[in-house]
Amino acid sequence: MTPEEVATFERCISVGGVALFPADTVYGLATEPDSREGVDRIYRLKGRAPEVPAAVMFFGLELALAALPELGARTREAVARLLPGALTLLVPNPVRRYPLACGPAPERLGLRVPLLEGELAPLAAVSWPVLQSSANRSGGPDASRVADVDEELRAGVDLILDGGELPGTPSTVVDLSAYESDGSWDIVREGAVPREAVVRCLR
């Protein structure tokens, strides 16, 4: 992946286009988080119910923390210990940022900051957050290669970034929505990061 390809990805997102791109787990679909047209296209491509939430991905931890200044100190510390990595964190969203990603729970946001190494390292230059969801039909298998993505889905995007073969296991989803108040948390979906690693970070 080249810096020129990453710049094209940023331009695509900035105008509400839909891109197929590699994360640190599986291939995903991305668009501008506040683009109703882009978000609707992703949901149509996936055949996904509109009330199912997505996540907002930042390509650097500092960008994520700067965009969510209302996070409490305890939650911010937890986010900084857990990310970047193959995790989706459900965090409080009291000012209801990125409502198109939140579905029926606007006061809770799914947050992703991937670990960008090797072939994916150029993506760390992306300064624009994206609303993202896995590049598969709803309920279908996750894609570890571009060739694994449904052909009609590939034909429906504006841009394809090929980052080679990915690990192929989706992110672990950790609910931190009550962490600020009482230190409690829960794993909503087992995935690429094992429970033991989360426990070590939040102990």
Image (spheres, grey):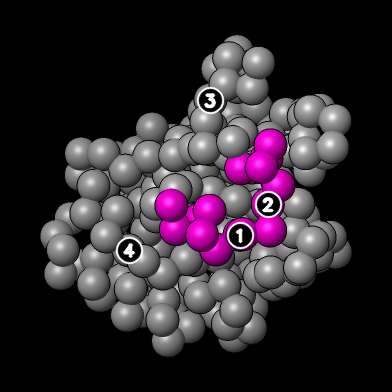
Residue 193's disc is 3
Alpha carbon distance from label 2 to label 3: 23 Å
Residue nearest the observer in this picture, 87 or 69: 69
Q: Earlier in the sequence, mark 3 or mark 4?
A: 4
The image shows residue 193, relative to residue 170, as above or below, that is above
Q: Quadrant of residue 67?
A: bottom right
Residue 68's disc is 1
Are dots 1 and 2 in contact, CB under 8 Å?
A: yes
Foreground mark, 3 or 4, reads 4
Q: Is residue 96 left or right of residue 5?
A: right
Residue 109's disc is none
Foreground mark, 1 or 4, reads 1
Q: Residue at x 66, y 42 (%)?
A: 73
Foreground mark, 2 or 3, reads 2
The image shows residue 30, relative to residue 28, as above or below, that is below
Foreground mark, 3 or 1, reads 1
Can I make out residue 101 in this image? yes
From the image, give the main secondary structure of the stretch colored magenta. Answer: helix
Residue 71's disc is 2
How many marks are shown on the rendered structure?
4
Magenta-drawn stretch contains 24 = no
Alpha carbon distance from label 1 to label 2: 6 Å
The image shows residue 116, relative to residue 195, as above or below, that is below
**What residue is shown with label 4?**
126
Q: Earlier in the sequence, mark 3 or mark 1?
A: 1
